[in-house]
Image (cartoon, rainbow, N blue to C red):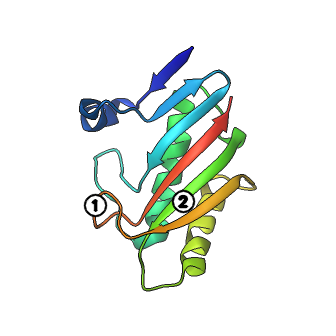
Amino acid sequence: MTERFTRAHMKPLIEPYGLCEAVRHGNTLYLSGQTGMDARHRIVDGGLKAQALQAFRNIQDVIATAGGRAENLVSLTWYLSESPRGMMEDALDVTAAREEVFPGLVAASTAVRVRALLAPEILVEIQAVCAL
């Protein structure tokens, strides 16, 4: 059995495209990529770390919406837009944001540098998998 989850404030943005924020299949929750977009549909100011913080908070909220627990995150994929900084510097900002939202979390992780994300102001998108 498959269930789909989308937070109420995100439905107008993504449902017209046939998308959802998460799909539960069995005991696994697969989350769509989350960005630094807040509940008012604005990308937060403050650069990469601020956007990563918001993305991780969004992940936390989506997991809760689906009835899961964030400590059961098992996999993260970070997509980082091109930056004049080095990949490792950017990864340290995302790691610091993750630690702030999910202290002590160790999950299988992959970081990918991409030319661009959905909009030029988006610096990071984070996809996740959570065991339920």
Q: Determine whether label 2 and label 1 are within 8 Å by CB.
A: no
The mark found on residue 119 in the picture is 1
Q: Quadrant of residue 111?
A: bottom right
Tag 1 or tag 2, which sits nearer the N-term? 2
Residue drawn 30% across and 66% down? 121
At x 59%, y 32%, the residue is 29
Residue farthest top in this picture: 1
| Position above or below: 124 against 4 | below
Q: Position of residue 13 (x, y in %)?
A: 26, 38
Rate crowding at label 2 as few (under 14), some (14 to 19) or many (20 or more) other CA atoms within 10 Å: many
Kindly indicate the quadrant of the structure image that contains residue 35.
Answer: bottom left
Other residues around mark 1 within 10 Å, as few (<14) / some (14–19) / many (≥20): few
The residue type indicated by label 2 comes to Trp
Residue ID for mark 2:
78
Residue 17 location, x and y as percent?
Answer: 27, 34
What count of labels does the image hold? Answer: 2
Taking 29 as reference, is 77 above or below it? Answer: below
| Closer-to-camera residue (92/116) | 116
Element type where label 2 sits in the image = strand
Image coordinates of residue 6 in percent, x first then y, are 41, 30
Taking the image as shown, residue 101 lies to the left or right of residue 125, namely right
In the rendered image of this protein, does residue 73 appear above or below residue 66? below
Q: Is label 1 in a helix, a strand or a loop?
A: loop
Left or right of residue 92: residue 82? left
Three-letter amino acid code at the position of disc 1? Ala
